[in-house]
């Protein structure tokens, strides 16, 4: 087998080149090749400096994640990097693309780093439930200080080459087209000088001068890192760099790394990494399916949803024509889009110029004729089949042939909507989640006639606007809301049987959801869809509305809210629920937290199994992607199907039986065969 590493001599400089598509992951062959190349350089008197660079789209994007969990084959990355750093001939990293994780650690082990301005550097291991494991947590703080190192290691977000230069992570910037030549020149200029080694850098002065730095940083991240193990280990490792010798610090890093690597959180997050990428692929739609060019979008409805949907495309530089029925609604919609952009700008995440550029791409209209030349029209009107059909009938008349007609419906039958057109092959569901400009998930609903090029185009487009897409077949509520309804059924049933509604919320909060169903109801508004007749009370929600408990908007819903929106359980609501239960003859009892959690979550897993059985999801991991990105299922458990695999499908099936709840054929047969929904839990 040919090595992915080759070397080229440029006078007295050895250029070491990796060619390991797609992302130059540091698999065994790459590590071995790098180690050999360094030995070649050291043993050759004609070589006085080394440059390491990569072919293809990027510098090393990290360790090869597919090797994790398999028996290790040497050389490992730490020893490869130690050999590199130990060289007394200068070694220069020439960086383009993304130097991530182990790739950034390669750069840190080099004596110098030269990068093109478009390059990004980062240590995203926390996103895989890990911390850097090749001395990144020890070399980085010694090079740039603890304060600059902490966000890189703990948030895992990459930084630009310019920012990297400002903190001392990059020594020089090179032209986009002259990286190799400039890196060679840089290396030559350092020949004969003592090499700077990050591992020999002074302990992080700032962390020593200001020991509270770490606690302050941890407190500032508390909300974001709740429930995750890796960020705390990352803080501990960076702190250790200031307190321990380099060798001891590396030992500490290894201990923390190994503990995370063998834990369930990292397994879950690695599962998610591949799940997200798999979800973008549709089994029977070939990769090379020709795409429909999307140059202009139409959005019908300028309400919260339509406005949010539009912003995705405007922010990506794609013009949007937004349609409403009346001028005031249209003006209001456009104003809201502007206000949203302006508040993003106020938070420093956009410039005033970018706001104007995005707004300049938005064309408001009251006329369907203005949608004629759109390549994709997304309907976001009232959830009513007749209304949707009217809209699609109209679109079919005015919009050019070959354009995609999408509905943002969250539960209606896409196939029925498509019958209102003469081109059902071009009809597809694009279910955005509110707020549509923020939430990552896009449920792409595939009708029975939806064409391959339509699907391929929508999947590609979703990536371009920063969404994570997953495909669902046509069924009520699709993947996400269909499973949610099972959880909601149980939540309602539990409070009738005697569970406190705040305990139901807290159980989900403890599990890692950002909020529970009753908090959610208060946030969304209890009166959504209310008939507004306080004398007609047939549900708990109607009883709350009759008592003018509309949710957070008027300071009382299921909970009472203070000025700061802190929630307190309400005696009035407790009474309303007890009265309802009595009316229905429900016997009330104390319900444990375990029962509450299991009754909320197991039926969701069961519904997920039915969704798989019916072919409504292509794979179990797509369901995980939907729930993590659209409904706040905690990432560190890997999503409902992976979580079920982790706790055991037998446990789920017997639990459901014990509670007298249905068990689907797929769940039963997979459990009985000792199988798992996901192949590699
Ligand atoms: C680490 O480094 C630990 C060390 O500290 C310690 C070691 C001791 N390995 O995302 P894309 C595949 S942990 C294996 O669609 P993009 C990916 O699955 C690692 N495979 O492209 C996909 O395959 P497929 C720290 C990988 O252009 C294909 O490459 N590093 C890896 O949108 C294309 O990927 C990270 O966490 C990998 N490391 O984005 C970086 N990376 O075509 C993870 C990618 O079969 N990677 N693949 O679906 C990324 O963030 C993005 O892939 C990147 C490119 C930004 C590089």
Image: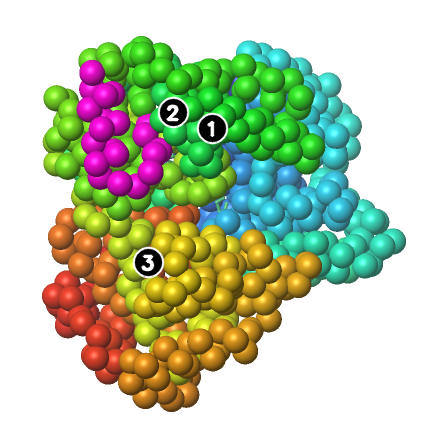
Q: Is the C-beta separation of discs 1 and 2 under 8 Å?
A: yes
Q: Earlier in the sequence, mark 2 or mark 3?
A: 2
Nearer to us of marks 3 and 1 is: 1
Characterize the local packing of mark 3: few (<14), some (14-19) or many (20 or more) Cα atoms within 10 angstroms: some
Look at the image and say whether residue 386 sits in the magenta stretch. Answer: yes
Dot 3 falls on a residue whose secondary structure is helix
Look at the image and say whether residue 573 sits in the magenta stretch. Answer: no
Characterize the local packing of mark 1: few (<14), some (14-19) or many (20 or more) Cα atoms within 10 angstroms: some
Residue 507 location (% of width, % of height): 46, 72
- What's the magenta region? 378-397
Q: Nearer the viewer, residue 53 or 436?
A: 436
Residue found at x 77% / y 32%? 194
- The rendered magenta stretch, by its main secondary structure, is classed as helix
Dot 1 falls on a residue whose secondary structure is helix
Residue found at x 46% / y 18%? 364
Q: Is the C-beta separation of discs 2 and 3 under 8 Å?
A: no
Residue of label 2: 325
Q: Quadrant of the C terminus?
A: bottom left
Per the rendering, the mark at residue 208 is none
Per the rendering, the mark at residue 484 is 3
Q: Quadrant of the N terminus?
A: top left
Indicate the quadrant where residue 306 lies. top left
Q: Is residue 279 left or right of residue 611?
A: right
């Amino acid at each position: 087998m040919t090595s992915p590493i080759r070397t080229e001599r440029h006078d007295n400089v050895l250029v070491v080149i990796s060619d390991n598509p797609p992302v130059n992951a540091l698999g065994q062959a790459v590590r071995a090749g790098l180690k050999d190349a360094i030995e070649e350089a050291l043993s050759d008197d004609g070589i006085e400096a080394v440059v390491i660079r990569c072919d293809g789209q990027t510098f090393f994007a990290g360790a090869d994640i597919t090797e994790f969990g398999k028996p290790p084959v040497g050389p490992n990355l730490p020893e490869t990097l130690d050999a590199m750093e130990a060289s007394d001939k200068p070694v220069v990293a020439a960086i383009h693309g993304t130097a991530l994780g182990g790739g950034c650690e390669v750069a840190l082990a080099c004596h110098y780093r030269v990068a093109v301005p478009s390059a990004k550097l980062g240590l995203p291991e926390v996103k895989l439930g890990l911390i850097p494991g090749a001395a990144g947590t020890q070399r980085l703080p010694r090079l740039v200080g603890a304060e600059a190192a902490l966000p890189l290691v703990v948030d895992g977000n990459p930084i630009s080459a310019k920012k990297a230069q400002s903190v001392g992570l990059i020594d020089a910037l090179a032209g986009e087209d002259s990286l190799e030549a400039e890196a060679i020149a840089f290396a030559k200029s350092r020949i004969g000088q003592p090499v700077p080694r990050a591992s020999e850098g002074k302990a992080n002065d700032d962390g020593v001068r200001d020991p509270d730095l770490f606690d302050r940083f941890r407190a500032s991240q508390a909300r974001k890192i709740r429930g995750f193990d890796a960020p705390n280990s990352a803080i501990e490792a960076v702190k250790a760099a200031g307190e321990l010798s380099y060798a001891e610090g590396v030992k500490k890093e290894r201990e923390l790394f190994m503990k995370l690597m063998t834990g369930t959180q990292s397994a879950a997050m690695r599962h998610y990494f591949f799940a997200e990428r798999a979800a973008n692929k549709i089994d029977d739609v070939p990769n090379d399916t020709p795409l429909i060019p999307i140059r202009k979008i139409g959005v019908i409805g300028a309400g919260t949803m339509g406005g949010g949907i539009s912003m995705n495309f405007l922010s990506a530089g794609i013009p949007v024509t937004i349609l409403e029925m009346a001028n005031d609604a249209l003006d209001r919609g456009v104003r809201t889009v502007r206000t949203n952009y302006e508040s993003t700008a106020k938070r420093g995440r956009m410039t005033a110029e970018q706001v104007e550029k995005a707004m300049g791409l938005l064309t408001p209209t009251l006329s369907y004729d203005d949608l004629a030349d759109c390549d994709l029209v997304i309907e976001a009107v009232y959830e009513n089949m007749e209304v949707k059909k009217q809209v699609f009938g109209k679109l079919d008349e005015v919009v050019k042939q070959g354009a995609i007609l999408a509905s943002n419906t969250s539960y209606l039958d896409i196939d029925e909507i498509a019958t209102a057109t003469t081109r059902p092959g071009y009809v597809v569901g694009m279910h955005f989640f509110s707020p549509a400009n923020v939430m990552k998930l896009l449920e792409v609903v595939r009708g029975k006639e939806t064409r391959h090029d339509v699907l391929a185009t929508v999947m590609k487009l979703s990536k371009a606007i920063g969404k994570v897409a997953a495909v669902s077949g046509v069924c009520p509520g699709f993947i996400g809301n269909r499973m949610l309804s099972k959880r909601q059924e149980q939540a309602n049933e539990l409070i009738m049987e005697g569970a406190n509604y705040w305990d139901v919320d807290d159980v989900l909060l403890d599990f890692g959801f950002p909020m529970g169903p009753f908090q959610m109801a208060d946030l969304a508004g209890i009166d959504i869809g209310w008939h507004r007749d306080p004398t007609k009370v047939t549900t708990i929600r109607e009883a709350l509305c009759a008592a003018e408990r509309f949710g957070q908007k008027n300071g009382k819903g299921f909970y009472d809210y203070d000025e700061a929106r802190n929630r307190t359980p309400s005696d009035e609501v407790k009474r309303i629920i007890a009265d309802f239960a009595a009316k229905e003859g429900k016997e009330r009892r104390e319900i444990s937290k375990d029962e509450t959690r299991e009754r909320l979550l197991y039926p969701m897993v069961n519904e997920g199994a039915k969704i798989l059985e019916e072919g409504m999801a292509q794979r179990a991991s797509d369901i995980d992607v939907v729930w993590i990105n659209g409904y706040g299922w905690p990432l560190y458990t890997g999503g409902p199907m992976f979580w079920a695999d982790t706790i055991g499908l037998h446990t789920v099936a017997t639990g459901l039986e014990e509670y007298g709840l249905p068990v689907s054929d797929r769940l039963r047969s997979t459990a009985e065969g000792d199988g798992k929904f996901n192949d590699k839990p």
